[in-house]
Image (spheres, grey):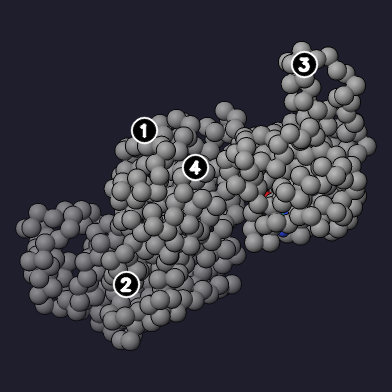
Amino acid sequence: MKILVSDDVSAKGVELLRRNGYHVDIKTNLDEKDLITCIGEYDGLITRSMTHVTAEVIEAAGKLKIIGRAGVGIDSIDLKAATARGIIVVNAPTSNTIAATEHTCAMILAVTRHIPQAHDSLMAGEWNREKFTGIQLKDKTVGIIGVGRIGSRIAKRMQAMEMKTIGYDPYIPEERGKQLGCELVDLDTLLREADYITLHTPLTKETRGMIGAEEIAKMKKGVRVINVSRGAVLDIHALAAALKSGHVAGAAVDVFPEEPLTADINPFKGMENVVITPHIGASTVEAQEGVSVDVAEGIMAGLRGEPVPTAVNMVPIAKNVYLTIQPYFDLMERIGIIGVYLAEGPMKEITVEYTGKLAETETGLLTTAVLKGALNPILQDSVNFVNAPDVAKQRHISVKEIRSADPGTFVDAVTVRIVTEKGEHSIVGTLFNRTEAKIVQIDGYRVDFTPENYLILAPHIDQPNMIGQISTILGEARINITGMQVGNMTQKGTNIMAIAVADDIPSNVMLKLKAIDGILDMKLIHCEPHQ
Ligand code: NAD
């Protein structure tokens, strides 16, 4: 598989991809036209913020399955267009947390003690100590807007400076604030009380322009404002005006609504009470290596057809939930595949019933895995964890999840029922020892087989020599049988046989098998999950 890296990313991730057999091309500084011209040959794309992955680029990306953003912000990727095409978008949200936290601390100290200005003055041959008198941090209040990964770490670090920390974050519980020693208050209180205000929210509809002239006017006179989050959260023109008027005593800004910030659009030009840096919050060696390795791991998981915990256009999933359900993904997809092969006519309804421990966890992605399995064999376009629920909806397949408190016969089992116009089929699967995938029931027949890549399912009349005849035909065709199982509970004189074979079976051999007297139906199922 081929991956294009279109911005500078640390070599570590690229090496990881190459070690795992991926062909990686590094082509930086491509404009939209160049990208449109070459993107068609790639399965994966890795970018940072310089590459704009527009709807037009996505339209031209015939093979593209996954886009990895080596960093956090995904404003440079047309997420809607990617999702519509079933392209997974992953980022690396955690690897630059420490870098951004430490940069924020550096910015707070720099703006408090005029470090860049003092440095420049000394370099220019001056020795001016009065001009650079600062204030102390101890006993001041810092207001943290957005108390997530970075905001919470700022709280800890600023507490070490003996500052009082307060926070505004409507999406975290009060309890979390207490744990952090950071009292959660409403926005107006924070604006009114803080000596330092530091922004750490993502850029969303709600946070775009969240701190403008009106909010700045509510701040304490002499406040210092720091933004190392996203440029568009803060109105830099309003901030520049407040710095000029003296209402805001100092500001430190790393991110801008328009980047790069060129001299002609820089509202802080010539101002002494500002420290600005060119979006270097994440620029540490450790963070750059971390993001490139994280994004490479996400890309590989996505290309293997597995769900990716860092995908931004898939159902978000907590790490502990992921660890619980992860062993089941392959089984679920194989059950979906078996289901669609058994189903005759268009599927109308897919019900997934979870029992045991599975009934106690979030199972949305497992249900999606069943849909992925059931839809890929019948559709031209690739169906994956991103688009499977939408594709099912478009095809008017109603999808239901049931959680059953009754542990049933099998521990932690999954029952998938597929309803078509002609009737209903059901498959029950489970994992023995959380590793060994087993199908334990099909259409009411009790079975016990591993869903191998090539599988024959044959309902038949329960009579002697059925196994013998099938083995003979397969043996003559030199097809190796790797497993064979006959159901152990007959239904009205019928039974089901599941045969795992090492290879695909030619159609003439299938015809011979189907012609055996007593075979009621025979399905050759290519059970391997779609990548
Ligand atoms: P996070 O998702 O862990 O935390 C964000 C917090 O903001 C969450 O707790 C969320 O509840 C809160 N939030 C959301 N909407 C809010 C609102 N309307 N008001 C108040 N709080 C709100 O994210 P993070 O990893 O801490 O990153 C924070 C920001 O820093 C992001 O914008 C990210 O892009 C940016 N960042 C910048 C750099 C850089 O180079 N300057 C590097 C890394 C991260």
Q: Quadrant of residue 371?
A: bottom left
143 left or right of 407? right
Q: Earlier in the sequence, mark 1 or mark 3?
A: 1
Q: Callout 3: helix, strand or loop?
A: helix
Residue at screen point 43% across, 76% down: 393
Give the label, 2 or 1, closer to the camera.
Answer: 1
Question: Which of the two discs, 3 and 4, labels the residue nearer the N terminus?
Answer: 4
Sequence order check, earlier mark of 2 and 4: 4
Query: Does the CB distance between marks 2 and 1 fall below 8 Å?
Result: no
Q: Out of 54 and 286, give the one closest to the viewer.
A: 54
Q: Earlier in the sequence, mark 2 or mark 1?
A: 1
How far across and how far down the image is residue 87, in percent?
41, 57
- Of circles 1 and 4, the one toward us is 4
Instruction: Say the numbered circle drawn on residue 340.
Output: 2
From what the image shows, is residue 293 above or below residue 324? above
Identify residue for label 4: 50
Nearest to N terminus: mark 1 or mark 4: 1
Q: Which mark is residue 122?
A: 3
Are dots 3 and 2 in contact, CB under 8 Å? no
Indicate left or right for 267 with 219 as reference.
left
Q: Residues within 10 Å of mark 3 (few under 14, many from 20)?
A: few
Q: Which mark is residue 19?
A: 1
For the residues bearing labels 1 and 3, Cβ distance under 8 angstroms: no
* Three-letter residue code for mark 2: Val
- Residue at (33, 56) in percent of width and height: 60
Mark 1 vs mark 4, CA separation in Å: 26 Å
Q: Is residue 39 above or below residue 278?
A: below
* Three-letter code for the amino acid on which mark 4 is drawn: Met
